[in-house]
């Protein structure tokens, strides 16, 4: 008997993930912020990702068509060269680290991924790509912790790294009670070494 049955719906997105070495480097830089602001809702390090397309809540039956389409996209493209840099916030509520490197290539990849997803019959809000890595969220009545934490990352410049894989990520549940966790549904390697600005 399956202890983890497929949920009827799940939240799904397409993303890139920094390698462990880059995440560890950023986590060390966040040390003072972790200590000063334990009340923030910190994302798990294993969940850090760069979203290319957030598809929202989808029927789980939609996933197979996305798998087939995205595997071909990854196989046809070289890796990108990216790095994590600095920090900032959205509306004093969401803390992020910025993305540096081949941003033109990143935007092209996101545009291709979004068009491909729509060609599979999946409609989703077309928000502008603002490349970032979400780190934490503040509670409604806390307007100071996130800007203060962002300031601790102002001088942070991480090492450059090649994007290893294109990730299709899904939640453990759709709507309902309980905390939502995300995991790879599948991930596909890019075609080869990165190409673009050094």
Image (cartoon, rainbow, N blue to C red):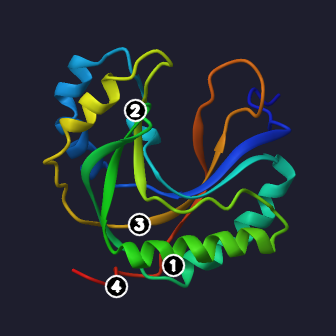
Q: Secondary structure at mark 4?
A: loop
Q: Nearer the viewer, mark 4 or mark 3?
A: 4
Q: Disc 1 and disc 3: Cα gap in Å?
A: 17 Å
User: Mark 4 sits on what residue?
Assistant: 195
115 lies above or below 144: below
Question: Which residue is at 74% across, 64% downward?
Answer: 66
Tell me residue 161's x, y (percent).
27, 65
* Label placed on residue 164: 3
Q: Nearer the viewer, mark 4 or mark 1?
A: 1
Q: Quadrant of the N terminus?
A: top right
User: Mark 1 sits on what residue?
Assistant: 108
Mark 4 or mark 3: whose residue is earlier in sequence: 3
Q: Disc 4 and disc 1: Cα gap in Å?
A: 13 Å
* Label placed on residue 92: 2
Q: Nearer the viewer, residue 149 or 21?
A: 149
Question: Which residue is at 75% across, 41% downward?
Answer: 10
């Amino acid at each position: 008997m399956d202890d983890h049955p497929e949920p009827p719906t799940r939240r799904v997105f397409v993303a890139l993930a920094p390698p462990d070495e880059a995440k560890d480097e950023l986590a060390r830089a966040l040390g003072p912020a972790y200590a000063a602001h334990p009340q923030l809702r910190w994302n798990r390090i294993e969940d850090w990702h760069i979203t290319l397309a957030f598809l929202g809540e989808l029927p789980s039956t939609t996933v197979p068509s996305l798998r087939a389409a995205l595997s071909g996209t990854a196989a046809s493209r070289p890796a990108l060269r990216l790095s994590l840099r600095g920090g900032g916030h959205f509306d004093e509520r969401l803390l992020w680290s910025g993305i540096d490197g081949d941003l033109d290539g990143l935007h092209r990849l996101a545009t291709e991924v979004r068009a491909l997803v729509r060609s599979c019959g999946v409609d989703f809000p077309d928000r502008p790509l603002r490349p970032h890595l979400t780190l934490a969220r503040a509670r409604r009545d806390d307007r100071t912790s996130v800007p203060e934490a962002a300031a601790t990352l102002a001088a942070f410049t991480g090492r450059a790294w090649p994007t290893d894989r294109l990730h299709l990520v899904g939640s453990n549940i759709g709507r309902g009670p309980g905390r939502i966790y995300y995991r790879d549904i599948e991930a596909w390697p890019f075609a080869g070494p990165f190409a673009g600005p050094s």
